[in-house]
Image (cartoon, rainbow, N blue to C red):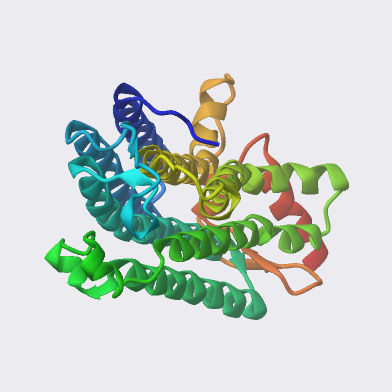
């Protein structure tokens, strides 16, 4: 499960992935400006997440420059104290300090991305039950991020901030960081799955043909890319925590691998959340027929089940092969 990372690989990931995420957000903003769609809360929140992803990338690069990430720990002898399986050195101590800061930024980043996705859903769908459930999900994602953030920040009580918690004399004050990492990895996958499946029942109850329902769902299921990466990251962390023997564990390579997968997940999540907003621009550039401007009316249209979709720029920005226009027309027909 180890990636056997090298310094140049960690640096490349730290530069390339945040750059791709930034390009996706830039295209999202450009598409909105090009189509005359005002920027909303979810746009600005995803912009903040891009800054945080750069923080993760820069941390990877700094850790590599300090000789900790992309390196390998030296195995300790059989008589090593405290059942330590590595011969700890300066690089190992620096790596644990890097992981401390990285884990805090990571929790904020993932939480911000999930909240942005939920706010985008709330712009598209309307309905009393949906509003309550989506608001509840926002609260859950926020509380999860805060809970694990505090756990990461104070895993060694206030001794975290003395930066001396790596020494064995301070270890008795610390919780097992592996438990926190594993717990958050599992919670992250569960919330990702929930967000991925969130629009499915809403779209499925609309009065549309099966082909139209599938076409609309495919727009929302682009987030499966991020969920797939989250699952891989969870498996990697659980394997490191519970799946290896009690013998030598390469601490530096383990930390490097975990940090790289976290950066991959955050970057892919940003790109996946931006793809629906970028698709109208791609569709427009690939056809000689321009898309018509969205209706200036923001009157909500209801279908017999009570679910409502707001006829506003949100529908237009997600439009591809006129699905949303056909969807609105069908809802209007149902209302008559």
Q: Residue at x 66, y 62 (%)?
A: 198
User: In the rendering, at what x and y percent does residue 69 appear?
Assistant: 29, 36
Direction left: furthest residue? 162
Of the pair 318 and 189, the residue shown nearer to us: 189
The image quadrant that residue 72 belongs to is top left
Q: In the figure, is residue 267 to the left or right of 104? A: right
In the rendered image, the vertical position of residue 84 relative to residue 123, given as above or below: above
In the rendered image, the vertical position of residue 75 relative to residue 12, given as above or below: below
Direction right: furthest residue? 210
Of the pair 73 and 222, the residue shown nearer to us: 73
Tell me the quarter of the image containing the C terminus.
bottom right
Q: In the figure, is residue 282 to the left or right of 96? A: right
User: In the rendering, at what x and y percent does residue 300 appear?
Assistant: 61, 67
Q: Residue at x 58, y 43 (%)?
A: 232
Q: In the figure, is residue 263 to the left or right of 167? A: right
User: In the rendering, at what x and y percent does residue 229 appear?
Assistant: 56, 42
Direction front: furthest residue? 79
Q: Residue at x 30, y 22 (%)?
A: 8
Q: In the figure, is residue 118 to the left or right of 214? A: left
User: In the rendering, at what x and y percent does residue 165 appear?
Assistant: 22, 64
In the rendered image, the vertical position of residue 41 relative to residue 47, given as above or below: below
Of the pair 194 and 246, the residue shown nearer to us: 246
Q: Residue at x 54, y 66 (%)?
A: 122
Q: Is residue 42 visible?
A: yes
In the rendered image, the vertical position of residue 332 relative to residue 271, given as above or below: below
Tell me the quarter of the image containing the N terminus.
top right
């Amino acid at each position: 499960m180890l990636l056997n990372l090298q310094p140049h690989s960690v640096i490349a990931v730290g530069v390339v992935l945040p750059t791709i995420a930034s390009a996706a957000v830039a295209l999202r903003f450009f598409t909105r400006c090009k189509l005359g769609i005002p920027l909303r809360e979810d746009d600005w929140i995803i912009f903040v997440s891009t800054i945080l992803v750069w923080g993760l990338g820069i941390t990877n690069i700094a850790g590599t420059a300090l000789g900790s990430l992309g390196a390998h720990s030296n195995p300790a002898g059989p008589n090593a104290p405290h059942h330590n399986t590595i011969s700890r050195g300066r690089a190992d101590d620096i790596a644990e300090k890097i992981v401390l800061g990285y884990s805090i930024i990571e929790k904020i980043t993932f939480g911000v991305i999930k909240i942005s996705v939920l706010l985008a859903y709330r712009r598209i769908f309307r309905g009393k039950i949906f509003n309550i459930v989506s608001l509840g999900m926002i609260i859950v994602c926020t509380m999860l991020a805060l809970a694990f953030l505090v756990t990461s920040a104070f895993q060694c009580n206030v001794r975290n901030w003395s930066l001396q918690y790596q020494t064995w004399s301070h270890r008795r004050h610390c919780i097992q960081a592996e438990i926190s990492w594993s717990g958050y990895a599992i919670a992250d996958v569960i919330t990702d799955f929930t967000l991925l499946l969130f629009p499915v029942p809403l779209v499925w109850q609309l009065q549309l043909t099966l082909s139209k329902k599938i076409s609309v769902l495919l727009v929302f299921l682009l987030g499966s890319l991020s969920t797939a990466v989250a699952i891989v990251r969870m498996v990697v962390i659980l394997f490191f925590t519970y799946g290896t023997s009690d013998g030598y564990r390469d601490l530096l390579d383990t930390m490097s691998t975990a940090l790289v997968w976290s950066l991959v997940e955050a970057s892919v999540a940003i790109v996946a959340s931006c793809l629906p907003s970028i698709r109208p621009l791609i569709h427009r550039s690939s056809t000689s027929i321009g898309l018509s401007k969205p209706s200036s009316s923001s009157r909500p249209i209801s279908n017999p089940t009570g679910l409502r979709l707001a006829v506003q720029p949100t529908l237009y920005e997600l439009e591809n092969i006129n699905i949303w226009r056909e969807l609105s027309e069908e809802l209007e027909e149902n209302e008559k």
